[in-house]
């Protein structure tokens, strides 16, 4: 993922002075995952790409002393473990913070700065398209979103906690992972619009659940999900609502988000198969759509505290 870059005298000057790279042409912006791979000089531990909604990546990287070039998407990040000094230099302006639990760093799309990080960093990143921010703002009945504010190790436990749950979007179950990632991206976009723009977007409380017909239709679609085509967009369209309003109305009606509801249904199905049949754990994993028995076992243990094998032995 580290492609050599042709010598650029202007870029060399920017690196030596710490000045930002101008973003005169949008076409010069780079995909966030490629730019991160270039400057971090490694590959992500995990990555889930969905260009229309947002990409989630988990990295562990060493020291960084380089200019991050303008990127197509906003980069929102938090730090699961450790403490590390962060320094961002834009022209003569210097921002200093610490990579640690409960803080976020935001690199707005199209911006550029020199970064100096002296040591190891464990980081979860979301690459958030501007179109997603605009859609969420529009669906909430708000005006166009304001410009994102650069943040360097900024305290925001709520956004940090949301990003930390991104590991659940990498469980190895395509249907659950896609649905969760879409929900998580919309939640994060809502939070970013409310807390990290020059003109914060107000979000009015939403009350009222789905109509009985719409709820029945959504549950039927969730129960019959057998491929990765299931999406929040499809569920919301069936109900005649935007994604923003559908998720809140579904939770009002069921007490669970669409992803949590489907995960609970899959857990109950797994328990029934483990308890009432002799099918192998490999077969259970395949029926539920997991990429491997290991991925299924890890997800099952997160929800129950036991491995499928241990649970089966205890229940028989």
Image (spheres, rainbow, N blue to C red):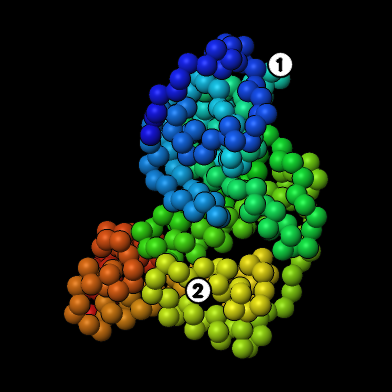
Based on the displayed image, in which of its 4 quarters is residue 13 positioned? top right
In the rendered view of the protein, which quadrant contains the N terminus?
top left
Q: Residue at x 59, y 83 (%)?
A: 215
Vertical placement of residue 109 versus 195, above or below: above
Q: Residues within 10 Å of mark 2 (few under 14, many from 20)?
A: some
Instruction: Name the spot of residue 5 as percent of width and height, x first.
Output: 45, 23
Identify the image quadrant of residue 67. Answer: top right
**Residue 304 rendering spot, x and y as whole percentages:** 38, 67
Question: What residue did someone put label 1 on?
Answer: 92
Q: Depth check: 311 or 91 in front? A: 91
According to the picture, the residue beneath numbered tag 2 turns out to be 261
Which comes before the other along the chain, label 2 or label 1?
1
Q: Secondary structure at mark 2?
A: helix
Residue 156 in sight here: yes
* Front one among 119 and 49: 49
Residue at image coords 33%, 72%: 288
Quadrant assignment, res 257: bottom right
Identify whether 244 is placed above or below 71.
Answer: below
Residue 122 in the image: state x and y as whole percent. 45, 36
Q: Judge left or right: residue 193 versus residue 292.
A: right
What number of labels is visible? 2
Q: Is residue 25 above or below residue 244?
A: above
Q: Is residue 6 left or right of residue 288?
A: right
Q: Bin the neighbour count of mark 1 within 10 Å (Cα to Cα): few under 14, some 14-19, many 20 and up.
A: few
Tell which of 92 and 293 is nearer to you: 92
Residue at the image point whose x is 49% and y is 42% from the top: 124
Element carrying mark 1 = loop
Q: Classify 260 as above or below 272.
A: above
Q: Position of residue 44 (x, y in %)?
A: 40, 39
Q: CA distance from mark 2 to mark 1?
A: 50 Å
Asked if disc 2 and disc 1 are in contact, CB closer than 8 Å, the reply is no
């Amino acid at each position: 993922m580290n492609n050599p870059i042709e010598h650029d005298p202007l870029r060399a000057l920017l690196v030596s002075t710490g000045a930002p790279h101008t973003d005169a042409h949008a076409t010069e912006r780079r995909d966030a995952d490629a730019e991160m791979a270039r400057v971090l000089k490694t590959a992500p531990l995990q990555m889930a790409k969905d260009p229309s909604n947002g990409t989630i990546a988990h990295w562990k990287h060493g020291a960084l002393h380089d200019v991050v070039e303008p990127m197509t998407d906003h980069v929102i990040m938090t730090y699961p473990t450790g403490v590390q000094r962060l320094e961002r230099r834009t022209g003569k302006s210097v921002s200093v913070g610490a990579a640690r639990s409960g803080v976020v760093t935001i690199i707005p799309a199209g911006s550029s700065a020199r970064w100096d990080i002296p040591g190891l960093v464990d980081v979860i990143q979301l690459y958030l398209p501007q179109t997603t921010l605009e859609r969420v703002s529009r669906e909430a009945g708000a005006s166009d979103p304001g410009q994102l504010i650069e943040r360097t190790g900024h305290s925001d436990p709520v956004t940090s906690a949301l990003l930390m749950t991104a590991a659940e979007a990498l469980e190895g179950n395509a249907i659950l992972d896609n649905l969760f990632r879409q929900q998580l991206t919309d939640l994060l976009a809502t939070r970013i619009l409310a807390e990290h723009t020059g003109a914060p977007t107000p979000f009015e409380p939403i009350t009222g659940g789905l109509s009985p017909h719409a709820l029945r239709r959504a549950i039927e679609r969730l129960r019959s999900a057998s491929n990765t085509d299931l999406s929040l967009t499809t569920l919301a369209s069936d109900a005649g609502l935007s994604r923003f309003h559908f998720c809140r109305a579904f939770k009002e009606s069921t007490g669970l988000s669409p992803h949590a509801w489907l995960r609970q249904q899959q857990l109950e199905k797994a328990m029934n198969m483990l308890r009432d049949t002799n099918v192998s754990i490999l077969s259970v994993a395949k029926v539920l759509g997991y990429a491997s028995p290991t991925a299924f076992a890890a997800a099952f243990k997160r929800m129950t505290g036991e491995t499928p094998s241990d649970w089966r032995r205890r229940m028989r």
